[in-house]
Amino acid sequence: MCNTSFSERGDKETVESGAFLMPKYDRDGLIVAVVTDVASGEVLMVGYMNEEALKRTIETGEAWYWSRSRQGFWKKGETSGQVQTVHEILTDCDQDALVLKVSVAGNGATCHVGYRSCFFRKITTPTDGAVGLERVESEKVYDPAEVYGKG
Amino acid sequence: MCNTSFSERGDKETVESGAFLMPKYDRDGLIVAVVTDVASGEVLMVGYMNEEALKRTIETGEAWYWSRSRQGFWKKGETSGQVQTVHEILTDCDQDALVLKVSVAGNGATCHVGYRSCFFRKITTPTDGAVGLERVESEKVYDPAEVYGKG
């Protein structure tokens, strides 16, 4: 591990146009990370990082997150083998969001439901009433029951 | 306006594999929306919607957000002309995030700093010390000072 450090938040101009990373965390100490496939550009998932997860990601070149549901560090792929090698990390104007361009190891899927992307459904416009969902991925990459066991 | 409505949250199986939109909002009543260019797939910005903003977006086909800093509805492009026509909305497995595939009107830029995407900088890996940023967009699409005035 090297001595990765982030600069203190500067003024609006410095944050928006400056040459240093100054991440803005929410009140839980988290920053949102949009994960895209480095080859296709497809959005694969949205995760959250705290400062330590972001440092581990930068230092190791593999994606680490903070699991909000489990309240713990989560190295993507540790159980599933779907490890994310990080090729590039972008940040936005106010530095409160990240984009990670990754390639996925193992079976190449990202979603625990079995699809390539977690965004495997699109909204169908209702003529009246409840908004529906329709699958945009025709089939699963793998059967989660075979990886994680049934039930 | 039609009678757009969202279904109540179901159990895990229904949320993850069902055919109805059941958005999960955070404790501020917001859901994160990743905005991508429908043609290139590039991530343009990350915004937040409350239920009403999402309904307006679905009903009008143009993107509405909830501004956390201004605590009010924000129709993207109302001032700048950078209106987002929404071609598709995806949701993820646990339905707590959205992807909007849009085309941008006006000067075609999304970022108020002047770039096409808000993610116009990438992280540079430090050999030691503070993490830096480097521009990935070579030039601005427009000069914000000419649109919004200086200072």
Image: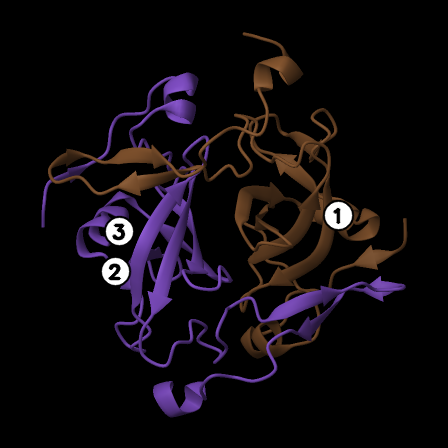
Chain colours: A purple, B brown
Mark 3 → mark 2, Cα distance in angstroms: 10 Å
Q: Toward the viewer: A35 or B26? A: A35
For label 3, count other residues whose C-alpha is less than 10 Å away and answer few (under 14), some (14-19) or many (20+): many
Q: Toward the viewer: B75 or A69? A: B75
- Side of B62 relative to A112 (left or right): right
Q: What residue type is labelled 2?
A: Glu
Query: Which residue is depicted at the point 39% across and 44% down?
Result: A90
Q: Which amino acid does label 3 sit on?
A: Ala
Chain ID at mark 2: A
Q: Examine the image and state in which quarter residue B29 appears.
A: top right
- Return the x and y of residue A38 as percentages of the image width and height: 40, 60
Point out the frontmost of discs 3 and 2.
Answer: 2
Query: Of helix, strand and loop, which one carries label 3?
Result: helix
Query: Which residue is depicted at the point 66% across and 37% down?
Result: B108
Q: Is residue B117 above or below residue A66?
A: above
Q: What residue type is labelled 1?
A: Thr
Residue B19, label in figure: none
The residue that disc 2 covers is A62
Instruction: Give the residue at the far front of this rendering.
Output: B138
Chain ID at mark 3: A
The residue that disc 1 covers is B57
- Return the x and y of residue A2 as percentages of the image width and height: 9, 45
- Return the x and y of residue A106 as percentages of the image width and height: 31, 79
Q: Can residue B28 be spotted in the picture?
A: no
Q: Toward the viewer: B23 or A89? A: A89
For the C terminus of chain B, the image quarter is: top right
Query: Of helix, strand and loop, which one carries label 2?
Result: loop
